[in-house]
Image (cartoon, rainbow, N blue to C red):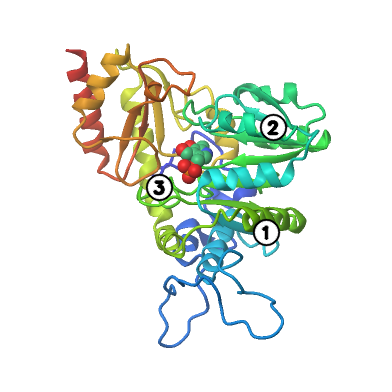
Amino acid sequence: MSDNGTPGASGAPDAAAGAGGERHGGIGDGTRAVRAGLPEPVKYEPTLPGPVFAAHFHLPGEPTGPYTYGRDENPTWTHLERAIGELEAPGESGASTLVFASGMAAISAVLFSQLRSGDAVVLPDDGYQALPLLHEQLRAYGIEVRTAPTGGDAQLSVLAGARLLWLETPSNPGLDVCDVRRMVAAAHEAGALVAVDNTLATPLGQRPLQLGADFSVASDTKGMTGHGDILLGHVSCRDPERAAEVRRWRKIVGAIPGPMEAWLAHRSLATLALRIDRQCATALALAEALSGHRDVAGLRYPGLPGDPSHEVAARQMRRFGSVVSFVLPDREWADRFLDALRLVDDATSFGGVRSTAERRGRWGGDAVPEGFVRFSVGAEDPDDLIADALGALDKAAR
Ligand code: PLP
């Protein structure tokens, strides 16, 4: 493992994702993130144009694009969509990216624009805890919902005849991983489309379109924007017809981001590689420090060489994410641990520059033990964070 958290000695980087796992088309991820989506320089104009606040645009004559009405398009989204597109599919002009008001808006856009009454969809049963909320809605539209766990390619066992296979890898909060290439090959063979929720990895960690998926979907509320201050989501895909269907869904539902959020997101992307490299390296160091600790069970981090997912993760991921999960002996123990942390907020969500941790069992939606802790590693100095975590474990044991 290299010191920036990218697969090295312990896992071969994905050749298709870029030689050395870092560079594609001659530039590295950090360089690409800094420049992603910027327009051509114009004298006296800012490098990243400010947010455009407009419900409508001057539009004499025939009402054709690019900018007509604020629910259809906005120049600030255009810049952000180009930026995310450059990260999702570097060097590919054919891929489209659409931004949404939240990750759930992006997920719903793919599901409800692609599925029709009579179709079947395969969802993970250990993914983000709002997915089950969708089941009832999908069934109400006459769509059959099938579920299976992420690990061990289990979703393939219920794939026959399905229209869409939904993957979330690594899964939240259990951090299981499935082999995306293998799942895509089987799904395409069976005539199903594949969408990957890439929230945990971000496109710097894994590029679902390059692994063969039809849709890469994410909550950009997390690592992509990384400051815990905005909600946002996106969908990327290569097929222009699919993109048009998702765009149409966004228009009719109106699940659009505000221009200020879109601009803040674009500004945040410039530091994506810096943040993610730091966070992934510290997450690995934290996982190593917790590994073998007497009070810690069920430790999961896909970047940890001994993790059950490591081999598959190392084949398809370029960075292993900022989330570590583990189980403390019971609910009270976990609460004492969280209470004793000084540098880590007891808060939900993940991927931000400030570390957060929480006992997931408190929400009631995840099939996890009461002492299960999801720890999101931020950009603090690794030694400080690890000392804080180990100190809190000591205090929790007393
Ligand atoms: N997908 C995953 C894996 C998530 O963890 C979340 C939120 O936690 C979402 C989607 C939903 O994103 P949002 O809260 O931006 O709607």
Q: Which residue is mark 2?
A: 140
Does 97 appear above or below 163? below
Q: Which quadrant would the C terminus be assigned to in this image?
A: top left
Residue behind label 1 places its C-beta within 8 angstroms of ligand 1? no
Q: Residue at x 46, y 33 (%)?
A: 303
* Viewer-nearest residue: 349 or 384: 349
Using the image, determine if residue 307 lies above or below residue 116: above
Q: Which dot, 2 or 1, sits closer to the camera?
A: 2
Residue 335 figure quarter: top left
Residue that carries the numbered disc 1 in the rendered image: 95
Ligand 1 within 8 Å, label 3 CB: no
Gap between marks 1 and 3, in whole Å? Answer: 26 Å
Q: What distance separates the C-alpha of mark 2 from that of mark 1?
A: 32 Å
Which is nearer the N-term, disc 2 or disc 1?
A: 1
Pick whichever of labels 2 and 3 is earlier in the sequence. 2
Q: Secondary structure at mark 1?
A: loop
Q: Position of residue 337 (x, y in %)?
A: 24, 22
The reply to whether residue 14 is in sight is no
The 10 Å Cα crowd at callout 2, few under 14, some 14 to 19, many 20 or more, is few
Residue type at mark 1 is Ala
Give amino acid for label 2: Ala
Secondary element at tag 2:
helix
User: Residue 291's x, y, as percent?
Assistant: 35, 21
Q: Earlier in the sequence, mark 1 or mark 3?
A: 1
Q: Choose top left, top right, bottom left or bottom right for residue 292.
A: top left
Residue at which label 3 appears:
277
Q: At which x and y percent is residue 370? A: 38, 15
Mark 2 vs mark 3, CA separation in Å: 43 Å
Residue type (three-letter) at the residue carrying disc 3: Asp
Q: Residues within 10 Å of mark 1 (few under 14, many from 20)?
A: some
